Amino acid sequence: MSGEKLPALVVEYPVGHSRRRKEGVPLLEDKFRTNLAHHFPVKQKKAIIDLCLNQKRLEETPVNEFVDMFVI
């Protein structure tokens, strides 16, 4: 180690904080898509994303039907 000191960095509102919602939501959606892609076929991934992005349909979907979408 060189003994070099780094300046202190303070992050008062990290991504995900309600004050940074506009920045955080797209990152969260990208993470969701990426993780779905690692586990589900394209057609199944698309169905899950389409439902999740349609709040009215999502709220009207019975829980058991929603959970069934995640079965491979």
Image (cartoon, rainbow, N blue to C red):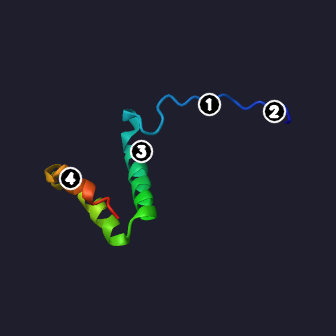
Secondary structure at badge 4 equals: helix
Badge 4 or badge 1: first in the primary sequence: 1
Q: Which mark is residue 4?
A: 2
Mark 1: amino acid? Leu
- Up the image or down, 24 lies above or below 6; here it is below
Residue 45 placement, left or right of 62: right
**SS of the residue at dot 2?**
loop
Q: Residues within 10 Å of mark 3 (few under 14, many from 20)?
A: some
Q: Secondary structure at mark 3?
A: helix
Q: Residue at x 37, y 44 (%)?
A: 22
Q: Which mark is residue 9?
A: 1
- Decide if residue 54 is in sight here: no
Which numbered disc, 2 or 4, marks the residue that appears first in the sequence?
Answer: 2
Counting residues from the start of the chain, the first of labels 3 and 1 encountered is 1
Q: Is residue 10 left or right of residue 26?
A: right
Amino acid identity at mark 2: Glu
Counting from the top left corner in percent of width and height, residue 72 is at 35, 65
Q: Residue at x 41, y 34 (%)?
A: 17
Earlier along the polypeptide chain: callout 2 or callout 1? 2
As drawn, which residue projects farthest toward the left?
A: 60
Amino acid at the residue labelled 3: Glu
Along the line of sight, the residue nearer the viewer: 65 or 10 = 65
Q: Which residue is mark 3?
A: 23
